[in-house]
Image (tube, rainbow, N blue to C red):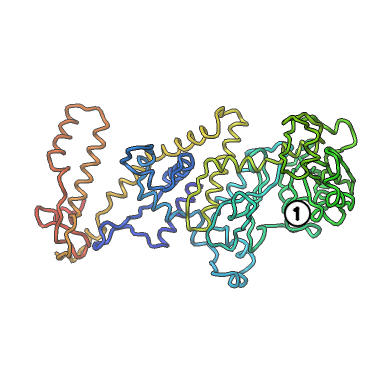
Amino acid sequence: MYETIAMNTNKYAVVRGALTKAPLDKPYSRIWWPTTADEIRVFFGICIYMGVHQEKRYAVYWEKIQAEGPRHSISQRMSIRRYEALRKYIHLSDPEQLPPEPRDPEEEKLLPSEAMEKLWWWKVEPLLSHFRNACKAHYIPRNDVAIDEIMVRFFGRSYHTYKMPGKPIKQGYKIFALADQGYVFVVQLTSRTHGIGQLLRDEDLTPTGSMVLQMARQLPQIPGSPFTIFLDNYFTSISLFRKLRNENIGACGTTRAGAAGKDFPALLTVLRESYSKKLDWGTICAIPVDDVLCVGWQDNNLVLGLTTVHTVDRAEDEVTRWRRRPAKTSTNAATARRVFGDLARVELDIPIFIDDYNCNMNGVDLANQHREAYDTQRIAYRVWWPIFHWVLDQAVINAYKLAKVKGTWKSDHLAFRRNLYTQLLHFADSTRRTQAVSLSEHLSDRRLDPGPHEWIQLQTRKTCAWCRYVARTKRKVIAALSGTTQTLATRQILGDITNSGGNKRLNACWSGCKHCGVPLCKMGDCWAKYHAPE
């Protein structure tokens, strides 16, 4: 995957017309040289580093003089100019195979259906598909999993983001996920314009219910070990639970009377609407409908739920748990606080289906909590970047969960991320050689052409190309020899190079070669050496 991203990034740089050599009139222009898989690893390591050590502006990571505050180490692994160049040109997908980009939804209607579905998330491919396959290939979930939504923050202009004022993240992309205690096993993207992507619609279910059924069918088939899916009231319905039961998959979740379906018992609806403030705490009412148990349980309010894996008519269907006394301002506080008396916490008997829901519904929430603490996402204007950063973050979280399950990692999540970005940043040692070769190739390719090579008068003074090349070569030799054992011969070579003027100020000249497009000084033999074959 690193090789693919590096190849597509180089292609995209060519498509965007990235400069490979500085023009004569702009000698300080930023030069692009092809990236490699190891450099992409370093870039990913820098992203993870920035998630752990968060700063408001990325330029702070490369500040050299700081009277107070930390000194960041990533400046020794990659320059800020190279980091900005990679941020500008990095591309996950093949730029030659992208579908056309319409400017408004009216133009999208003219495109084929496959192009419309792939349009908004195709730039995250093939990384997204690789991530999806890896999630299912390396882990077998526990029997209890959860399906919930994930909001990825993005306030840019997009037809595919959602606004959800009631959520901690008010606006962004919505991703549905099936997770086990923070490990995301199945991912499903959705768009405000096109709906749920790659959806196999069931005629008896809503699009959301069809999506849940489609995700549930991707769970591994383990004989004698059926799965139970926990859902909130956004997904649940009697028809969905019935189909999951036919697939030998259990389900449990809260519901709303209007969303559960027309078969939902009217008695529970009446209790919820008219008697929720009159029932004693702990009152329970259960009515089966086609092998789906519809339950109403009085807590702070009447909680409605559906389950296909629980019963409520036996003594063992209850469990004792510590409960906190609700606040005086909570719904139905007068009735709910009565069982607590003057105590803030009391052991009470609650239904097992409520306890199971409370313990297992947080599978996706744990992934959100892990990501929120060390989020790699930064301000970006390309609409696919938030999804890319989410994939990167969740891949790290999944790797951490795998390491904990296998017993190869004993420490916490923060230490895991630090160890990971340290290993990725070590790949900078191999990229330095590639960058040095690329930087030394600043000599013009036209210098060995037949010509005609003619002197030209420049409008402003510029540094001689051959003097700059010689100075850089000397600095590289000095840096290479300084790290070796200092023998008498080595010290003599370093002395000769230093005395030869390697550290002197470079010549600024008013002349240059018209054909090569580079400045050259007339003093010495710079013209002859520059045009001589190596």
Q: Residue 191 in the image: x percent, y percent? A: 63, 59
Nearer the observer, 148 or 508:
148
Q: Nearer the viewer, residue 339 or 61?
A: 339
Residue 115, percent from left and from top: 60, 65
Q: Which residue is mark 1?
A: 209
In the image, residue 227 sits, relative to residue 213, either above or below, namely above
Residue at position x 61%, y 47% from top? 132
Let me know if residue 85 appears in the view: yes
Label 1: state its secondary structure. Answer: helix
Under mark 1, the amino acid is Gly
Residue at image coords 50%, 45%? 376
Q: Residue at x 79, y 39 (%)?
A: 336
Residue 224: quadrant of the picture: top right
Q: Residues within 10 Å of mark 1 (few under 14, many from 20)?
A: many
Question: In this view of the protein, can residue 213 be seen by the observer?
Answer: no
Quadrant position of residue 77: top left
Left or right placement of residue 51 versus residue 267 in this view: left
